[in-house]
Amino acid sequence: MSDDRGKSSVVDLVKDRLLAGSLTRSTTGRTDRTWPLPNQPWVMRMTWSELLFAHWPVDPAVVAKLLPAGVTLDTRDGKAWVGVVPFLMSNIAPRFCPPIPGLSRFLELNVRTYVTVDGKPGVWFFSLDAESRIAVRVARATFNLPYMDATMSIERGEGGEIQYKSGRTHRGEPSANYDASFSAAGEFFEAEPGSLEHWLTARYCLYSANRRGRIFRGEIDHPPWSLAPANYTERTNTMGDGFGFGFRIEGEPHLLLAKPVAVRAWVVSRCDAIT
C-alpha cells in the first residue's frame, strides 16, 4: 500500500507541475514555455541571430488605442513596453525541405508590444521591415502581419560590435529609419521567470488581425534565450514616429543582446477557432 501511495503522489506532483506550466514539451529540448506545444506539427524552421532587444516604457493609453478589439495590452508595473528588435533571419525553410533561395536569409527589424488574448501572452507587431521583397509579400498574405520593404545592412566591427541600418522603402507606408550599433556589455545569462527580462523576451506566440478584425495566433518554440546587457549607440530611430512612441525623447532603453536561437513555427490559427 505504501508503494501505491508513493506512486500516486509522484503522478499527482507531475500533473500539478504540468498544469502550472513548469513542465512542457519542446521541439528543441530545454524550454521555459508556460503552456504546452500545439497538437499539430510545426511547419517552418529558422535561426534568429545578431539580435537586440531595445525596449522603452510607454504610456499604456498611447499603446492600447492602437490595438484591435479582442487584444488586451499586457503591462508590467503599470507600464506598457514597446520594443525595437533588429536581427538576422537565416536557415529559413519549411519542414522537410531545404532552404528556399530568396527566402532563406534576410534582415528584419520589428516594432512590437506585448498583449494577451484569452489569457495567453504574446507579441503584437506594429511593423516588420525586411530586406526580402519576396518574404514581405509572402508574410503579408500568409500571416496577416504588417511586413514592409526596406533597404537594410549589417556589419560587424572590431570587438564584435554590430552596426545595423534600415530605411523603409515600402510604397504607401510612412518612412522609418534606424541606424545603431550594439555589442555585449557583460556575461550572458538566462532570465529568471518573474524578472522583467523574462517578461519581455519569453513570448511564444504572436498575434495578428485580418482586415475583418479577426484575430489570429501563431505559435513558436525555441530554447530559453541566452541574454547579455548591451552597449548601444543610436544615431537614428524614427521607427515609432508613426505610432506616437517618440523613442528619441523617452529616455534610455532597456537593452539585451541575444545569442543565436533555433526557432520552430506553426501555421497561424484563428483564435476563436482554437480549441
Image (tube, helix red, strand yellow):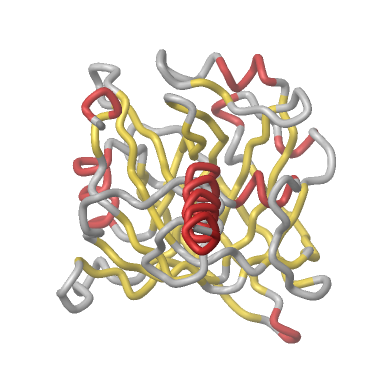
Q: Residue at x 28, y 36 (%)?
A: 144
View extreme (left): residue: 97
Q: Residue at x 35, y 68 (%)?
A: 46
| Residue 218 drawn above or below residue 94 | above
Rendered location of residue 229, percent (x, y): 78, 64
Q: Nearer the viewer, residue 178 or 76?
A: 76
Q: Locate residue 23 relative to residue 82 in the image: left or right.
A: left
Q: Locate residue 226 relative to residue 261 in the image: left or right.
A: right
Instruction: Please give the count of numbered marks on the rendered protein.
Output: 0
Rendered location of residue 245, percent (x, y): 66, 29
View extreme (bottom): residue: 158
Image quadrant where one finds the C terminus = top left
Q: Locate residue 59 relative to residue 16 in the image: left or right.
A: right
Rendered location of residue 248, percent (x, y): 75, 39
| Residue 36 drawn above or below residue 162 | above
Q: Nearer the viewer, residue 84 or 11?
A: 11
Q: Residue at x 78, y 28 (%)?
A: 77
Q: Residue at x 67, y 35 (%)?
A: 81
| Residue 182 drawn above or below residue 149 | below
| Residue 175 drawn above or below residue 184 | above
Q: Locate residue 227 relative to residue 122 in the image: left or right.
A: right
Rendered location of residue 150, percent (x, y): 41, 53
Q: Nearer the viewer, residue 252 or 17?
A: 17
Q: Which image quarter: residue 71?
A: top left
